[in-house]
Image: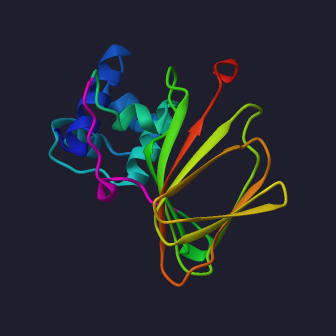
Amino acid sequence: MKEIHDIVAHNLKMYRTDNGLTLDNVSRRTGVSKTMLSQIERGDSIPSITTVWKIANGLKISFTSLIKSPNQKVDIKKKSGLMEMTGDDGRYRLYPFYPFESGHPFEMYQFEIEPGGVFAAEAHQPGAEEYIMIYDGMLNLKVQNEDYQIGSDMSIRFDADVPHVYTNIGDGIVRGTMTIYYSEQML
């Protein structure tokens, strides 16, 4: 398995050369110095998430296109290598193991909710389904004004095209996985 900085190095250089761009062109578009870009492409520097976002935004490409292993048939990820997304003042944490990408009709996340933590999710696109599996703790999931309690080693599936709310109602942290499935019409 390649390290993330090696993957970014490969993808950045490939994009730059495929599009006939010089390091100077990329530097002007992204605001990242030519020296830093050169170090990233050689694998001599580990870029921060902020730097990768600057490069992606400046080149008008997706963040995922810079961090995804090319033509990889096996993809192993560690939570420690993912960007943590937070809500509810850090009491809700989401880890995007497999964010949406073209050709794959799902997203897969791991989440953690501290005791008393709440996350209110907006409705997803019509036809979206959500699958939740709980490994630790006790989750209350509110869907269309109905409450469902899901504990360790339990799962729930629901139509996610309505607002829904996750609340940790236990004394310990809730840990689980969330898979959002999008119907073929939505792709």
Tell me, yes or no, if residue 71 can be seen here.
Answer: yes
Q: Is residue 129 left or right of residue 151?
A: right
Asked if residue 78 is positioned above or below residue 28 in the image, the reply reads below
Say left or right for 160 vs 81.
right
Q: Nearer the viewer, residue 184 or 70?
A: 184
Q: Main secondary structure of the magenta part?
A: loop
Residue 49, percent from left and from top: 39, 53
Residue at point 25%, 36% (across, down): 7
Furthest-bottom residue in this view: 171
174 in relation to 22, above or below:
below
Q: Is residue 168 above or below residue 157?
A: below
| Residue 76 is inside the magenta segment | yes
Q: Quadrant of residue 70?
A: top left
Q: Position of residue 139 (x, y in %)?
A: 60, 68
- Which image quadrant: the C terminus? top right
Classify residue 116 as left or right of residue 124. left
The structure residue drawn at horizontal position 34% and vertical position 15%, both measured from the top left corner, is 18
Residue 12, how many percent across, how many down?
31, 31
Q: Quadrant for residue 68, please give it.
A: top left
Q: Please give the range of residues in magenta.
A: 72-85
